[in-house]
Image (cartoon, rainbow, N blue to C red):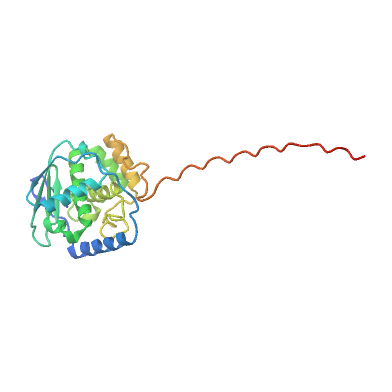
């Protein structure tokens, strides 16, 4: 989950511990089997312009399925994106993204990862949204909302989770797919240190900066329907008063 430096190289983030991600995937699978999802995010109307470099059809489908989970209007991205899927060095890199390039370790797209893979893919595409759509003034406003001790890589000593660019990508992944199956849910270990918890505030600000409304406004919990409005109680008809004859 990288940001390219000025010389075009890829600066690796902290290595994602696959065993931890697998534990989260198992926990999410168990939770899903016990209860219904908390929210149903409507899929975006269009996907980014994608080109795949490597990866099996199944691995490529994981990327597409992840993008379909998000309610973000991908058609806003002005440039196509090339997704490279391959074997990354163990413990060094799990993904990178910037401008028109996304790289994913195929281990993150394995069936064992379950829907954790969706969250990781959306994080990387959060970097694409950052690089293709945000201006520096926009980043300043978002930075003021979600926090961070550096903009991105300009201060190497700043921990990964305290960089604005990473907090933006993780919050983006959560805010437009705010379901309990999302591994960037702020209550889960994978996302707690990187995610700004108020998804609505994030979507409201990002939408106002980019000129679109909240695509999840008024979303109903999955498996529920709106309760019919109660009919107003009928007014009681006044009883007719019948005068009794006077006693003689």
- Can residue 232 be seen from the camera position used here? yes
Q: Where is residue 32 in the image (x, y as percent from the top left)?
A: 30, 59
Q: Which residue is drawn at 19% across and 46% down?
A: 125
The residue closer to the viewer here, 84 or 153, is: 84
Q: How many badges with numbers are in the image?
A: 0
- Is 140 on the left or on the right of 100, as rendered? right
Residue 112 higher or lower than 130, as above or below = below
Q: Quadrant of the C terminus?
A: top right
Direction from residue 152 to residue 53 in the image, left or right: left
Where is residue 229 shown, x and y percent of the image?
48, 42
Instruction: State the residue in front, 190 or 33.
Output: 33
Q: Residue at x 13, y 50 (%)?
A: 60
Residue placed most toward the observer, 2 or 223: 223
How far from the left and from the top, in percent, is residue 161? 24, 55
Question: Does residue 159 appear anywhere in the picture?
Answer: no
Q: Where is residue 76 in the image (x, y as percent from the top left)?
A: 21, 36
Q: Which residue is at a point 15% across and 58% down the rendered structure image?
A: 110
Q: Among all residues in the image, which is located at the extreme right?
A: 248
């Amino acid at each position: 989950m990288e940001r390219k430096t000025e010389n075009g190289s890829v600066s690796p983030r902290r290595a994602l511990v696959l065993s931890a991600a697998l534990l989260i995937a198992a926990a999410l699978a168990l939770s899903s089997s016990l209860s219904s999802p908390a929210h149903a995010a409507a899929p975006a109307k269009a996907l980014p312009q994608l080109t795949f470099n490597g990866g099996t059809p199944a691995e490529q489908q994981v990327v597409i399925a992840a993008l379909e989970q998000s309610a973000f209007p991908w058609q806003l991205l002005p440039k196509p994106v090339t997704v490279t899927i391959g074997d990354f060095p163990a413990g060094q890199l799990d993904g990178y993204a910037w401008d028109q390039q996304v790289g994913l370790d195929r281990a993150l797209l394995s069936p064992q990862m379950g829907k954790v893979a969706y969250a990781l893919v959306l994080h990387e595409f959060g970097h694409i949204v950052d690089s293709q759509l945000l201006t520096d003034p926009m980043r300043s406003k978002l930075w003021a909302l979600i926090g961070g001790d550096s903009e991105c890589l300009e201060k190497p000593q700043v921990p990964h989770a305290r960089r604005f660019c990473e907090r933006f990508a993780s919050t983006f992944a959560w805010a437009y797919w705010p379901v309990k199956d999302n591994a960037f849910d702020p209550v889960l270990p994978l996302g707690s240190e990187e995610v700004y918890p108020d998804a609505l505030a994030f979507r409201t600000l990002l939408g106002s900066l980019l000129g679109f409304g909240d695509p999840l406004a008024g979303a109903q919990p999955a498996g529920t329907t709106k309760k019919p409005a109660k009919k107003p109680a009928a007014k009681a008809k006044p009883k007719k008063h019948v005068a009794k004859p006077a006693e003689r």
